[in-house]
Image: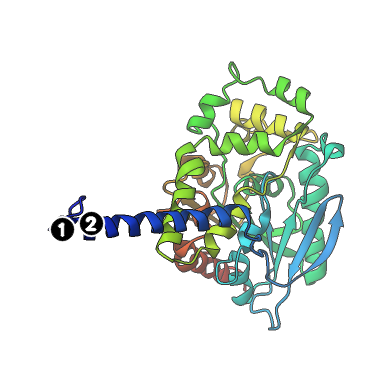
Amino acid sequence: MKKSLFLDGPAEEVGAKLQENVDRFADTTRKWIEVLNLDPLVETGLTPKDIVWRKNKARLYRYVTPHAYKHRTPLLILYALINKAYILDLLPGMSMVEHLVNEGFDVYLLDWGEFGWEDKDISFRQLVDEYIARAVRKVCQFSGVDELSIMGYCMGGTMTAMYAALFPQPRIKNIIMLAVPIDFEDAGISSIWLESTVFDVDNVTDTFGLIPKDFIDFGVKMLNPVNNFVSTYTRLWKSIDEELPIVAWKALNKWVNDNVSMPGRAYRQWIKYLYQQNLLVKDGFILGGRAVQLKKIECPLLVLTGETDHIVLPHQSTPILEYVSSTDTTYLQYKVGHGGLVFGSRARNEVFPSVSGWLAERSR
């Protein structure tokens, strides 16, 4: 029987129920405001780690385990430039990094740090040649091996492809790509907004120098404005009203609003040569006089996408399966959005085990 939207009964009972509802609404709203404005930030990135190498603001972490490694091949994780990498190690029990460490992998992560004005001229050539390439050599040095696996998430996966196409040594044994843009021909709303006739990236870059994090963040959030500016906060209110745990919401909200400014030179390259000219899949993206040719990637490749991802559409990721020369390729899609590949129950119960299982078979 459908529940009535109206109260019925004696006037005194109806009045008392109305007052109870008003008091509950006021109490929940008060708690909601306190959480948003007064609650301390949740601690994130708690998997034990050591800093084993630094360059400029970047730090290379090696995660600590009290147990012996089950897999000899180390894993280096590369993340995007515009967000903090702790989304991959958000909370105990909800951490890709923690899962991989517990599964016996020797895990490293390159944290880009926070770029400042003095970093505005950093380009993708420098990011690939001077940061990623050196981090790869350090991983092999510290782990005592001559090959490694690389996992790239979002823009970090695009840079993984750039590096793998240009550097045959040290040998890359496996590549894992999570929500990685490769083909920018149809990037959904982003393609409309960033089309060269309406978005002058040179003017934007010359004006800002260092692209402000708030400028980038607002653009990304406007891809799904109702969810980012309204629904996320109504979900918090509902959780408080129903007395559900909110620590996961607080941790994710912290990360969503903890962004990084981007070097203007790299931003110009990202927008002009990828979103506007789609050069990566045309062998036309040039780094230091060398063309990035995806066909030079020959190692086993795992590609994962989110079916409802509005930031990196699935069809932006899958073309790499056709462009590389790898004979061992796997594609997995999940009914999640962009962040759902690394956060949430489906990530913990499905994505994490799939990644570790695939990698374990190829890391002996």
**SS under mark 2:** helix
Q: Is residue 184 visible?
A: yes
How dense is the environment of label 1, judged by Cα within 10 Å: few (below 14), some, or many (20 and up)?
A: few
Apparent side of residue 334 relative to residue 71 in the rendered image (left or right): left
Residue 254, position as x, y percentages in the image: 62, 54
* Residue nearest the viewer, comparing 255 with 338: 255
Count of number-bearing discs: 2
Apparent side of residue 60 relative to residue 319 in the rendered image (left or right): right
Apparent side of residue 55 relative to residue 18 in the rendered image (left or right): right
* Residue nearest the viewer, comparing 146 with 102: 102
Residue 165, position as x, y percentages in the image: 68, 45
Q: Contact (CB < 8 A) between labels 2 and 1?
A: yes
> Which amino acid type corresponds to the residue marked 2 in the rendered image?
Val
CA gap between label 2 and label 1 equals 6 Å
* Residue nearest the viewer, comparing 37 with 288: 37
> Which amino acid type corresponds to the residue marked 1 in the rendered image?
Gly
Q: Earlier in the sequence, mark 2 or mark 1?
A: 1
Residue 333, position as x, y percentages in the image: 43, 53
Tell me the quadrant of the picture where the C terminus can be found. bottom right
Identity of the residue drawn at 78% across and 47% down: 114
Residue at the front extreme of this rendering: 12
Residue 276, position as x, y percentages in the image: 60, 26
Query: Which residue is denoted by mark 2 in the rendering?
Result: 14
Query: Which residue is denoted by mark 1 in the rendering?
Result: 9
**SS under mark 1:** loop
* Residue nearest the viewer, comparing 192 with 317: 192
Toward which corner of the image does residue 142 lie, by quadrant?
Answer: bottom right
